[in-house]
Amino acid sequence: MTNDTVQLELRQDGVLHVKETVTFEGGPPTRSLVDRTRYDDGDDRLYQVVNLKGDATMADASIVLKGSGTASLEYDVKGAVTPLAAAQELRWYAVGGWSVPVEQAKVTLSGPAQLQSLSCFAGPLSSAIACTEASMDHTGVTAEFGQQGLGAGEVLTVVVGYPTGATEGAPILERRFELSNAFTLNAVTGGALAGLVILMLGGIGILYWTRGRDDRVVGHESGAQSGVENGHFAPPDGVRPGQIGTLMDEQADVIDVTATIVDLAVRGYLRIDEQPRQTYDAPDWMLVQMPSAPVNSLLSYERALYDAIFDGRDSVLLSQLQGSFGHKLGKVRDALYRDVVTQGWFARRPDSVRTRWTTLGVVLTVAGVLATVALAWFTSYGLLGLALIIAGAALAVGGQYMPAKTSKGAGALAHTLGFREYLAGGHLGDDVPVAQRVELFSRYLPYAVIFDSVDRWARVVSSVNGNGRQADHLYWYHGPAEWDLSKFADSMRTFTMTTSGAISSTRQFRSL
């Protein structure tokens, strides 16, 4: 480029009108406009080039000349004026950013008032090196600037001072995204965040109080209950071992299924045969179907578990419970949740309630993340979006506690806790006839599995039989040769642990 002549006219409205004539050799050069600079810690300054006319086109802040040898163009620049304390400053990158060197650049400036100061810089955008020529005429209204030998990409920056009020111009600012600005903590954002968090968490608390709290039950608080009526086993409210875990913590757990297997054996639906083994062999048990058992009287979840165990066979080793057993345990879990609704202990399935509230919490959390990103990108109130994230996370976690028992369910729970208190209190049923103790204490055992006192009650069971003397086995649990009831406690503890492990490996139930 041999010559670049620019005429600048600053108008009253603050718009800088530019006429430019370029002489060049070879193909048309391209100019990259300076359209954005740093203004302060939080904002960028924009220079808007509009109304381009002449021998050029503009796209993406780049001007491409047309023709060959000479090009004339005309355009307006907005945002080049800055009001200062006692003056106005015009700053514009009048020449430069060309894809080729400029041998000679000349700039003439006129404006609506007399100049108070002038300067220019040549070189890179941040250069502080003065240009070769900067002067004003005798009227003080027009100034001229010049520079020889601008390199490719270098600019000639014109800086001129005017008196206050000379124009209506002002910088065009755009907030710059920075994390430090996006999450500004001050009295406004901090107070708003605290208020939103309190409001939302308070709303979640009200939701739990009104929707997730068990119905109050007057007169159902009770002490220890033995589970015996008229000399026969009768658990409070007829609650069975598999139902207790779902009743107590609204979860269908591995231990609930383990206790149900023991309960089915104690009640005569199957028999547990401990298998003989060598010293280093893993323990194993044969689950044997009792042909005369009235399986049609089982509850739906018990029948689903019974069918999952035997699956058309008369017996199965515990170690071989795999394949279809794991898939069918999903039906057991669903039947357990349906059962507690059928019993009237819950108005809705606990797992469905948890899923609904947890999903709502996740959706709220995602909305909070999106709101935080939007607020942080466009404003300095990114902290406010955190309130939604906190509330969503609280709701997602709190959703685990939203299932609520009905009055009937709360009463059954109170009685069940009384039964647990009895089992933990050391009452051995001295008033129970000796002939009934093995059966009664065996009926207690599945509940002891749920209440984590299986060792104690297994020892109680092993201490007596129908005649009050030691026996080789129970009616529902058989051991290998040279095994007697003195080893029952250890066998029972190992059986429950192994069974729980087998059920847990199917990933159908929550592990404790």
Image: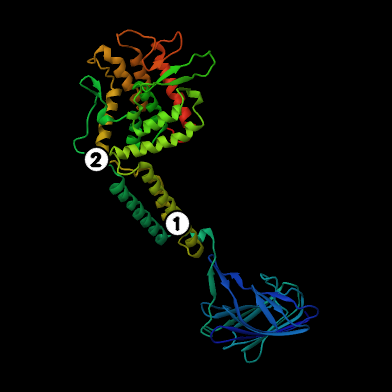
Q: Is residue 399 above or below residue 12?
A: above
Is 433 left, or right, of 89 in this rendering? left
Q: Which residue is mark 2?
A: 407
The mark that comes first in sequence, 2 or 1, is 1
Image location (x, y in percent) of residue 387: 41, 55
Instruction: Kindly identify which numbered label has been placed on residue 467.
Output: none
Q: CA distance from mark 2 to mark 1?
A: 36 Å
Query: Residue 48 is drawn in which quadrant?
Result: bottom right
- Looking at the rendering, in which quadrant would you find the N terminus? bottom right
The residue that label 1 is drawn on is: 367
Q: Amino acid at mark 1?
A: Ala
Q: Does residue 394 appear in this view? A: no
Using residue 153 as the reference point, say whether residue 341 is left or right of it: left
Of 228 and 335, nearer the camera is 335
Where does the image place residue 392, in percent across and percent down from the top left?
Answer: 41, 51
Figure quadrant of residue 200: bottom left
Q: Residue at x 44, y 33 (%)?
A: 511
Judging depth in this view, the residue of 337 and 244 nearest the camera is 337
